[in-house]
Amino acid sequence: MKKSMGAKTMILPTPVLIVGTYDVAGKPNVMTVAWGGVCCSEPPCIAISLRRATYTYWNIVEKKAFTVHIAVESYLKEADYFGIISGKKVDKFTATGLTPVRAEFVDAPYIKEFPLVFECKLLHTAEIGLHTQFIGEIVDTKIDEDMLTDDGFPAIEKMKPVAFAPGIRDYYSFGKVLGKAFSIGKQIGKEAT
Amino acid sequence: MKKSMGAKTMILPTPVLIVGTYDVAGKPNVMTVAWGGVCCSEPPCIAISLRRATYTYWNIVEKKAFTVHIAVESYLKEADYFGIISGKKVDKFTATGLTPVRAEFVDAPYIKEFPLVFECKLLHTAEIGLHTQFIGEIVDTKIDEDMLTDDGFPAIEKMKPVAFAPGIRDYYSFGKVLGKAFSIGKQIGKEAT
């Protein structure tokens, strides 16, 4: 029996995305957002949603560029911190001891210590309500070489990405592999025909 | 040392979202998408990206409504199947033996057997490129009562949501709880001040 909960934003899993930007003075900042993800394959794009009250919002409006990192277990405390405090008040790189690096293709910084980074240039902005959605075209993806599998994919078991459960507000590790996408469902097609 | 991979759509985790729609004749259909997630808190909204070639695309254009389910381990084979074959060719409910139920507030069907469902009405459409992004306002969330914690949140350990790793195309279970969001990072603030 299903119970109605009203309108809840509890998609599972939700990613933990760290957005890097420069302010007008060139100060690097990072902010953690949960509302975001890939939104197009060609051109490859990432959407992130931000409130106008954030420092990052105005940095993106100004610079039309941002980076996106995924949170990993080894820097989860830092990723959580980036979502708690505003870059208006503190230098988050100084506070955490992490290293800002100028991105190669866009006017935004990335965090050297985070293993997977997407460099994005702003393509489209949509005012939805409390949040504004910025869609950025991915112009490059950078990964720590020791985090690659032999086949050239991110090695999940080494990188240890983090998933978020909104509502209860818990961070989760990735568990076990359950199967291949575009593959395990084929059995049903065969049974049905 | 970071290696450049070019533009890759490899956000980790990526959700596994099953979108429910009716066609013009009222036939229920479901399709699995990976590009999507929450994009606004107020009004609460979910964004999903679809190619124009899909059956679901035209159903949403026509009906201006859709449901979103999350994939769970107990129906992962079915969720994968929904992303492999088009509703133009088969009745996916008949093929899987799952049960379509008319949503309470929008003109779309949901899958009775899936534990968590969001009913959405179309709010905004953005043509990005290969994919079109549909933003739907969540008007209700429905959950199987036995999948709730005592505090009224989705019970992750019972529901067993599934995460997707694009690129390598593996489905993953949720692992262990790593900590509370908006909490575990506070330690850094204290250290820094």
Image: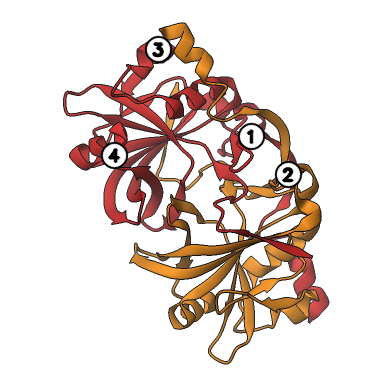
Chain colours: A red, B orange
From the viewer's side, name the closer residue of A139 and B93.
B93
Residue A122: horizontal and vertical position, in percent?
27, 47
How would you rate the neighbour count of disc 4 (Cα within 10 Å): few for under 14, some for 14-19, many for 20 or more?
A: many
Which label belongs to residue A170?
1
Do the residues indicated by labels 4 and 1 lie within the same chain of the protein? yes
Q: Are marks 2 and 1 in contact (CB under 8 Å)?
A: yes
In the image, taking residue B57 as reference, residue A126 lies left or right, namely left
Indicate which disc, 1 or 3, sits on the residue closer to the N terminus: 3
- The image quadrant that residue B184 belongs to is top right
Which label belongs to residue B156?
2
* Mark 2 chain: B
How would you rate the neighbour count of disc 1 (Cα within 10 Å): few for under 14, some for 14-19, many for 20 or more?
A: some
Q: Amino acid at mark 4?
A: Tyr
Q: Is residue B18 above or below residue B86?
A: above
Q: Amino acid at mark 3?
A: Ala
Do the residues indicated by labels 3 and 4 lie within the same chain of the protein? yes
Q: Amino acid at mark 2?
A: Ile
* Mark 4 chain: A
Which residue is the site of mark 3?
A95
